Amino acid sequence: MAGTPAVTYHDGQYDVFARSPRGVVYQKTWNGTWSDWKSIGGILG
């Protein structure tokens, strides 16, 4: 991942958002265990 990830928390769940070197946005979730990274689409410059 590139840059600094962003984290949100709501109702016992953490969501981490990060940008790949190509600018695609990915999300990883914690609600007792970590999910795999998944692409949520979009391209950030």
Image (tube, rainbow, N blue to C red):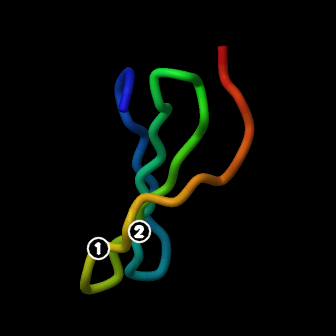
Left or right of 35? Residue 25 is right
On screen, residue 36 above or below 39: below
Which residue, as the protein is rendered here, is positioned at the far right?
A: 42
- Amino acid carrying mark 2 in the image: Thr
Residue shown at 66%/53% (left/top)?
40
Secondary structure beneath label 1: loop
Residue shown at 47%/81% (left/top)?
11
Residue shown at 38%/36% (left/top)?
5
Q: Which of marks 2 and 1 is nearer the N terminus?
A: 2
Disc 2, disc 1: CB below 8 Å? yes
- Amino acid carrying mark 1 in the image: Trp
According to the image, label 2 marks what residue? 29
According to the image, label 1 marks what residue? 34
Which quadrant holds residue 2?
top left
Label placed on residue 5: none
Which quadrant holds residue 13?
bottom left
Within-10-Å neighbours for mark 2: few <14, some 14–19, many 20+: some
Which residue, as the protein is rendered here, is positioned at the far top?
A: 45
Which residue, as the protein is rendered here, is positioned at the far left?
A: 33
Secondary structure beneath label 2: strand
Within-10-Å neighbours for mark 1: few <14, some 14–19, many 20+: few
Q: Where is residue 8 in the image (x, y as percent from the top left)?
A: 46, 55
Which quarter of the rendered picture does the N terminus lie within? top left
Q: Position of residue 23 (x, y in %)?
A: 59, 25
Q: Distance between the residues labelled 2 and 1?
A: 6 Å
- Using the image as rendered, state which of residue 41 and residue 15 is in the foreground: 41
